[in-house]
Amino acid sequence: MKKTLILMVGLLLFTSLAFAGGEKEAAEKKPIKVGAIFAVTGPASFLGAPEAKTVEMLVEEINAQGGILGRPLEVIVKDSAASPEKAISFAKQLIEEEKVIAILGPSTSGETLQIKELCESAQTILISCAAAESIVDPVASYVFKTPQKDSYAAIKIFQTMNEMGIERIGVVAANTGFGNAGIGQLKKYAPEHGIEIAIAETYDRAATDLTAVLTKINAQGIEAVVNWSIVPAQSIIPKNMKQLGMNVPLFQSHGFGNIKYVEAAGSAAEGIIFPCGRLLVAELLPDDHPQKNVLVTYKQNYESRFNEDVSTFGGHAYDALLILKKGIEMANSTDKAETRSAIENIKDFPGTGGVFSFSPADHNGLGIDSFEMLTVKNGKFALYKE
């Protein structure tokens, strides 16, 4: 009887241990859930659609290679259509219901700034694909971004103007979070570069004719125009300038990095100058450039899969997901706090936007050297040469 009891206890203990081991194994194989909020449709779809496609492609690649820490990756994509209200609702859903470790996106600065505090309070990592510098300044512990800083874009534009002898300019911008932030950066850095902003005007993101705004700009005797925008209206600016006979250079912000904007502007896009990452000119880089392999691989994979030109914006999502993956791997954990801390310690990580080196004081991780000045030549992006 005693022997039987010992055997039964042993069997129960073995069964319990086996069950516990099975539970642990099941937990280890459980998908790592990540949220994403992209403007797949709507006025900012030029940003969000390539971002969503990029993440779809990357998730398949990562899972085919064994996932992250041996666990499959699951990314839940929500289409905000660039609506801050939708972004807030989706962020709450992803955090509270889906229990995601992180959120990638949103696509636009306005949306990101609306959910920044929400993610910070929930201690959920946010890696934005939007550019406004205020996303990471002041620094919030759980908030990062992958596009280059607005201030660097403004400085690169002014440096190029200095080389061209331009001193008096007009500024136009979309009345969005990105546009308003851009005007602020241009006004801040213009005096340091001897540039006078004679006039600055904003326009509605849904505008279809900007002749009136540009007529006001043109009346100020300006030597160049800067347009700061991510919305489709930025393709209307060069067309309207051409119609008005404005024979001055047009500088665009880093929001111009999608060839579809060039196609929409047609021949009026020729000669536009803008700062951008190197993805759009990847093949022109020397073979020993630290970004060359990443850029060419992403470009080739994206274009062969989706049969469309790669864009800077898809690259922002590419960087966001791979930075998160690197952080999880460095932390060897999906704990939010540990992963967040690990991301702050990522150094010399080549992405599409530049070579990232984060720190507790820098949640963007890119320097001004992450920008190249590009132009439009024969309907294509090319390196700008004076």
Image: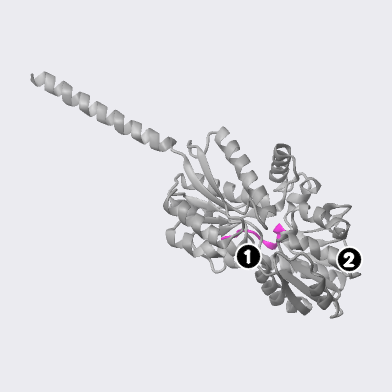
Q: Is residue 361 above or below residue 27?
A: below
Residue 199, position in %: x, y? Answer: 77, 79
- Residue type indicated by callout 1: Ala
Residue ID for mark 1: 132
Q: Quadrant of the N terminus?
A: top left
Residue bounds of the magenta highlight: 362-371
Tell me where residue 6 sits by quadrant.
top left
Magenta region includes residue 128: no
Query: Quick check: marks 1 and 2 in contact, CB under 8 Å?
Result: no
352 sits to left or right of 264? left
Predominant SS along the magenta part: loop
- Residue type indicated by callout 2: Lys
Could you classify mark 2 by the number of other residues whose Cα lies within 10 Å: few (under 14), some (14-19), or many (20 or more)?
A: some
Who's the residue at 41% across and 37% down the image?
Answer: 28
Residue 11, position in %: x, y? Answer: 21, 24
Tally of numbered tags: 2
Q: Is residue 5 above or below residue 105?
A: above
Residue ID for mark 2: 242
